[in-house]
Image (cartoon, rainbow, N blue to C red):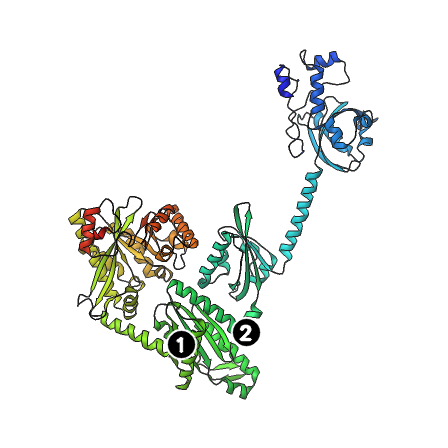
Amino acid sequence: MTRDLEAKGKTPKTSGRVHPASPEGELSGFRGQVQEPDPRRGDAEVESQLGSDFEVEDYREIFEYSLSGYALHEVLFDDEGNLRDLILLEVNRAFEAITELPASQVVGRRITETMPGIDLRHLRDAMAWLEAGDQEPYRFEQFVEGLGRYLEFAAIFPKRDQCTLFLADITDKKRAEKALEVQTVYFRELFEKSPLAIVVLDNDDCVQECNEGFERLFGYPREVARGKLINKLLVRPEDFDDARSISRKVLLGEVVDTEGVRLCRDGTALDVRILAHPVRLGDENLGIYGIYSDISRRKRDSLTRLPNRSTFMERLELELERASRDDHMTALLALDIDHLKDVNDTYGLVVGDALLVAVTERVKETLREGATVGRLGGDEFGILQMDLTDVGNAAGLARRLLAAMEPPFHVEGHRIHVGASVGIALAPAGHVAAKQLLSQAERALEQAKLEGRSIFKFHAADMDRQVQERMILGQELHGALERNELFLVYQPQIELPSRRVIGLEALLRWQHPTSGLVPPDQFVPAAEASGVIIPIGDWVLRTACEQAKRWQDSLALDLPVAVNLSAVQFKNPFFADTVVQALQDSGLAPELLELELTERILIEGTPIVKNSLERLRKLGVRFALDDFGKGYSSLEYLRQLPLERIKIDRSFVRNLEQDDNDAAIVSAISVLGNRLGLRVLAEGVERSSQLDLLAAEGCNEIQGFYFSPPVEPRKISRLLVDGSDSISPSSYDN
């Protein structure tokens, strides 16, 4: 209709605009007062008001076909000049549709008769509003009882005795708002009053909201919990990987129902059932909805509050799976209280139970972070020791436990001496079943008790094979340097997509005179345990720097050389001096040396480690974080440490084409590294399909057999001469 009028060149005279109803049925967009023609005037007057070329029929069409209800009124005043009522003069079709009142029934009648229940105070306010000079229509909403509807009104007074009302039916909107309000109240009450602990997390695992049940169960007031990482609040360090795995699965759309241990604010460990749901809006992940329920009564020993036998075995199975995946050693210690039966027979079960509680406290005080204790039954306890670096770690713990049992216990007014016996079973890299490991530990325990109690024994096979082999390797390594049995090989590091060689990693090898080539994962732990890793590490550093300098001088290539470091080396207070001396003796520029750190070095960080890092960083030495993603992978390291590169562990590359989880982890690490301005290198690339996937995920450097295995310096020299600009697969064979 407006286009028709404009086509005729006719425009109604207004001091603003009147917009039709919005799609939801609301009035919208009134600006100023509308100077509408008065239908009570003659055609001549109307034409004069609208303009000489504006036809009355045009106005009628606008009036009749407006999408908003439209009614013209005469104002009735009381004796004091206040608005008393309105007389309806004319209405349009939308008015009839909204009110379900035909014009014939309302024209000439009072608005209080046609719309019983309308509040005239709104109209009086509207008149005062406009008389005060405000140019905006006066809006109000009201439920009109006589019509049974919610209406939105916009009132204007062209003259004091004239009123124009625009109205829209907002009944459905109001009912929807009310339903949503009621639903919100229901869900809020359900959320707050639930006996379960409920928490809402964002996509970064930060607490957005929690309920009263969460406050009761874990002891964190919501104002303390909000904005905190849920893992820092509730998760033990040894459970970080599993907790992160839960979040990853949920954010990929899974519902996770599992059990685990979570920490209260006071440090108490609770066994909980965890139900985690994704919170989604369409295709968008909004976060995670987590529900915790306390299952400690089912999972804990009622006397000591330690994990009971079944719970302990569940944790043992999980730890062995993780140890196998991460290539860590695990120890299980079975501890038996000597002569507890004599205590029960002499002092009674009450004293015997109190003694067990006191023993529990001493055992817990003796354990360090990363160990778990449970009550296996009667007078037997199980201690799970994780991430061992050496067999001696288990022996050291056993000695501390035995020493803790030596002082007398003061229980229920009695001074009681008891001892303990310990049996130890080892699971190298977790490759043993939980029941088998427990059986081995208990057999070792029985042997300790047979040999006189208050001692510890390893399961014979573990002790004989591993300890003796490591001791032999450690002794033989002492003379390996002098016998020239140790040598370095180098593996190229390749830039994508150019395929240029951008660096070399120096890798240590041992050619044993009788056993042949000994794998590094066998002799390096032996070197660390025996202490010979320090002189060997110094030799590796010097040799790598000298070789890098020779390549620089002979080939005019400034290629950095990367050297792996042992945690034992880095804890040496003279390590930084050793690096500086190696650089000075070789003449290699500090920026051409890259030291590869492991997460173990960082986790066990000491002031010595931090001082060495800072000193070498200022010198210009580069640092890379090796095997990223395999350990705890704390983002704190990436933020605080002077790293230039992170290396994705080969375990994530191995099955990249088949395992979507590995692909997701690689993608996440690549994005994270690139965002932080770090170079991202993937290790263990052996196939072109892996190379293509890594490049697609944003990984910009690779290393692996696809281009070259670790080879001797002379072959590297030939490779650099032939392919200094780019390198083809298996170039070392050319």
Q: Residue at x 62, y 55 (%)?
A: 191
Give neighbour class at mark 1: few <14, some 14-19, many 20+ (Cα, 10 Å): many
Q: Is residue 618 above or below residue 526?
A: above
> Decide: marks 1, 2 in contact (CB < 8 A)?
no
Q: Secondary structure at mark 2?
A: loop
The answer to whether residue 36 shows anywhere in this view is no
Extreme-bottom residue of the structure: 346
Instruction: State the mark number for residue 667.
Output: none
List the single residue furthest toward the left: 554
Q: Amino acid at mark 1?
A: Ile
Query: Where, by quadrant of the figure, is residue 40 drawn?
Result: top right
Report the residue at 28% width, 70% height from top.
530
Taking the spot 28% from the left edge, 49% from the top edge, the residue there is 494
Q: Using the image, tell me which numbered label, if any, was put on residue 301.
A: 2
Residue 720: where, in percent of width, then height? 20, 49
Q: In front: 501, or 603?
A: 501
Q: Which residue in the structure is indicated by mark 1?
A: 424
Quarter of the rendering containing residue 240? bottom left
Mark positioned earlier in the residue sequence (1 or 2): 2
Residue 441 image position (x, y, % from top left): 42, 77
